[in-house]
Amino acid sequence: MKNTTSPVQVGDFAIGSSNFVVMAGPCSIESLDQFSETANIVKEYGATILRGGMFKLRTNPETFQGMGREAFDIAREVKKRTSMPFISEITDPRQVSDMAELVDVFQVGSRNMHNYALLKELGHVKKPVLLKRGFSGLISEWLLSAEYIVKHGNPNVILCERGIRTFETATRNTFDVNAIAFVKQNSNFPIIADPSHGTGATALVTPVALAAAAAGADGLIIEVHPRPSEALSDGFQALTPEMFKELMIKLERVLNALDRKIEKPQ
Amino acid sequence: MKNTTSPVQVGDFAIGSSNFVVMAGPCSIESLDQFSETANIVKEYGATILRGGMFKLRTNPETFQGMGREAFDIAREVKKRTSMPFISEITDPRQVSDMAELVDVFQVGSRNMHNYALLKELGHVKKPVLLKRGFSGLISEWLLSAEYIVKHGNPNVILCERGIRTFETATRNTFDVNAIAFVKQNSNFPIIADPSHGTGATALVTPVALAAAAAGADGLIIEVHPRPSEALSDGFQALTPEMFKELMIKLERVLNALDRKIEKPQ
Amino acid sequence: MKNTTSPVQVGDFAIGSSNFVVMAGPCSIESLDQFSETANIVKEYGATILRGGMFKLRTNPETFQGMGREAFDIAREVKKRTSMPFISEITDPRQVSDMAELVDVFQVGSRNMHNYALLKELGHVKKPVLLKRGFSGLISEWLLSAEYIVKHGNPNVILCERGIRTFETATRNTFDVNAIAFVKQNSNFPIIADPSHGTGATALVTPVALAAAAAGADGLIIEVHPRPSEALSDGFQALTPEMFKELMIKLERVLNALDRKIEKPQ
Amino acid sequence: MKNTTSPVQVGDFAIGSSNFVVMAGPCSIESLDQFSETANIVKEYGATILRGGMFKLRTNPETFQGMGREAFDIAREVKKRTSMPFISEITDPRQVSDMAELVDVFQVGSRNMHNYALLKELGHVKKPVLLKRGFSGLISEWLLSAEYIVKHGNPNVILCERGIRTFETATRNTFDVNAIAFVKQNSNFPIIADPSHGTGATALVTPVALAAAAAGADGLIIEVHPRPSEALSDGFQALTPEMFKELMIKLERVLNALDRKIEKPQ
């Protein structure tokens, strides 16, 4: 089984190479203190890219919708302090120009995999785009959504499996580990795994993260919060710093067993 | 079982009243001739609202994406000729102002049920919005998406069941007739049915349309094309004029049996 | 759309002819009084075939499993009193010989659509078999399961759509009305609808029953209980006698509108 | 995360202990030569338990249904030659007594997870039962099916995740790796993985097998055929001997990285 993935460059390293890339951080940026504290933690334990949501897509209009543009200064400051590349979700084609100077990777959420107006707009920038699979997106549709971005000018697409909607209700989503292996063998896009959304339960994140790595994923994106019970969104699936540390130790061992290693933060 | 639906006014009549409203027309506006011809046909056989796509959401970036703004003049002309209210799909929040003067009902497609940027923008207009169910949207999520529009200022939301994605592959989607009955009993929004997408097969449209009416739907939206095999999109699920005529005859008989009638074109 | 259904004879009438057949009764036989009372009610309001479970398939081993063979005498007595044909579920190939003298139609439940040992055994009798669709059975698999019975010698198979398992949780199952229309057009087996299991909610049974009739079903199987709140199984989806009466009135009107009528009890 | 699994003894070793158990062999026993050759191969590369189907559940009644009782002598002979414990599928409660002297583990296939007549019968023997998850079985239903066996007297139940039916069609099933982690944390039954059915594609078996191991599974069941293209059933998901050898090498490295090892054949 040959690896024909075309790596996508982010800063000084590439996603889709033999090195495994870990993105981590809180679901949402909540304050400078919270984001800075979390960034320091995930960097210390080996994450290379910092995640943090500013615009949140929430099913219920009455719930926290993210800090929005008020988070821009916080993100800018924490990037400066940690020197970490930053990934954040874009939810509206009108956000592209403002976000382009701030983020190193645009994240397209699961609900927007079919939002072709947004995908076309992201074709006009050169920044990498992390395209999450729609929670009911066929793999074939997902690859075509990636082609929307490529066709409009931006070849730097990274796929992200984050669990699909099935009949099962014991877990928030069903993480489709088959999709990791299938995409590696049938496309040239790098693919990473989001076991936080893929399971929707803190206790399941670590085993499923290791599974994704063993199946050949190019990286992970993980929700970490210093105090998950206080998180403004999705605390039920966030790892504590201690859990994240343990995950990184096991992850390195599993990857080494398969002749791979973790890309280290600079 | 009491009907507590709050009707939504479109022109001189209301959707969600005892009168049943039929929307019909081609999947896509392809030319003045094609759209005008189809409009005359559907009006003759009893449709009250004219449908016609201008911006199309297509899974594959290489397929026909709709005529876009080039269709605006065609739509304006056919509206004038037929005096029919016009419904068309909006796919980008930046289209709202241009489309607002042209359409009588904004259609939000299945892929955009979770596109909250678009829903919020549609909260700022007063025109009715037909909100299709996401093909994997829970009914509870669908009602919350409707609340996004209401919360931002526009109470004129009409729901549209258009089939959900399931394991079954004999039909394009699984039309969820339960959802019709459930929504009528558990929400105040009118709900109509789209058996064209709900089945994805011309031969199944009529029986499922009748089923939706018998289950209590407030109306239908139906794809009709003078020559389905020549349609630029979705011809496999379009009714011919003759089939549409037969559907309308049967529909009236079923509705009358349940003490309802079809809203007639003016 | 031609009807090529091959009718299946049950007593003096046929399922799959222009006449619509209603089967009704309690989920489970609980006592002679309960079953006799229910039988009288459903016969009075127009049901032609009496249903009543003796062997129940229950997900939880601690719940009521049906009266089993203790119900045989009750069923025999109520059949005699009402002169109604009797349908009941078979759950084990070893029950065939004992049940054959008692039931007029063998019911194969959803969980057993893939139980080929049972299907083969039912091929060796001549009694009609009502084959429910597996809650996750593809239509193509369902038709092949019917072929197991036919291939082993019994052509008298009636299909029953009873809802499929999907991501939706607002209803117990998703009643697949498309399947009714599809089967009528693509197979020769009669098909009836079970809106009790198809919805799993008393309030939804009537609209979905009417929908199934409008879509072309050959009949219905309905759970009725004199006092649903006291039922030992599935009371939440049973109609009261009054609801069943109203359903039959509306059903007749809808069928008449489509030039069909209800098969009357003798 | 504590491991509270209660190991199930098979011959001289236990499933659910720190040692990982690999079951392998052909989908179906086709001849003495084919079964003996395959058994030697899988034993050489490290499988501990020999699998081989005798009674096959096939969707289509016209396809190969297994050799049935004709395979008993072959199985007995190969067991003697290899000294390997033998697992084979039971499809009818009437097979229990005949099979009990031949098999070391009864396998209940996915289609029979809800076949309570069969499960009850298996409660009356003491042999271990491998209970595959129904392809649409909720985890909660699966655990209750296991309780049917336990309640009727047999506590020796091993669960097997084999992929679930979802909307995705790129793979035969969606292997639910979440279920592995969930069951380990929420039940006392050992759980193994079947990546052959879980993916339905030879090329995906190895990465998904490694994923299952990394997620904490207690073992694997793998289809291996000397010449997959000549297999009478499911050749498209069988590993060749060479592929199986490579899987075992990688598997050992991944398990060692997580402080576990593979149970060796005797």
Image (cartoon, coloured by chain):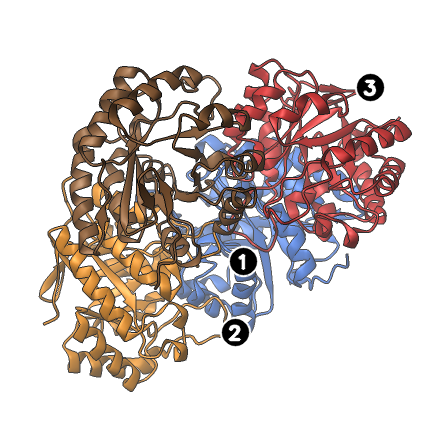
Chain colours: A brown, B red, C blue, D orange
**Residue A167 visible, this orientation:** no
Using the rendered view, name the quadrant where residue B210 is placed.
Answer: top right
How much space separates mark 2 and mark 1, taking CA atoms?
15 Å
- Which chain is indicated by disc 3? B
Task: Tell me the SS state at disc 2.
Answer: loop
Please state the horizontal and vertical placement of residue B200, each as a whole percent of the image: 66, 49
Using residue C7 as the reference point, say whether residue D93 is left or right of it. Answer: left
Front residue of C192 and B88: B88
Q: Label 1, on which residue?
A: C131
**Residue B240 visible, this orientation:** yes
> As shown in the figure, which amino acid type bears the numbered disc 2?
His
Task: Tell me the SS state at disc 1.
Answer: strand
- Badge 2 density bin: few <14, some 14–19, many ≥20, Cα 10 Å: some
Please state the horizontal and vertical placement of residue C194, each as a whole percent of the image: 57, 46
> As shown in the figure, which amino acid type bears the numbered disc 1?
Leu
Q: Quadrant of the N terminus of chain D?
A: top left
Front residue of B119 and A201: B119
Q: Label 2, on which residue?
A: C152
Using residue A46 as the reference point, say whether residue C36 is left or right of it. Answer: right
- Badge 1 density bin: few <14, some 14–19, many ≥20, Cα 10 Å: many
Rendered position, C24 above or below D173: above
Rendered position, A226 above or below A202: above
Mark 3 touches mark 2? (CB < 8 Å): no
Residue displayed at 56% across by 15% down: B151
Rendered position, C243 above or below C83: above
Q: Label 3, on which residue?
A: B12
Mark 3 against mark 2, which lies toward the viewer?
3
Residue displayed at 64% across by 19% down: B4
Using residue B87 as the reference point, say whether residue B39 is left or right of it. Answer: right
> As shown in the figure, which amino acid type bears the numbered disc 3?
Asp
- Dots 3 and 1 on the same chain: no
Mark 2 touches mark 1? (CB < 8 Å): no
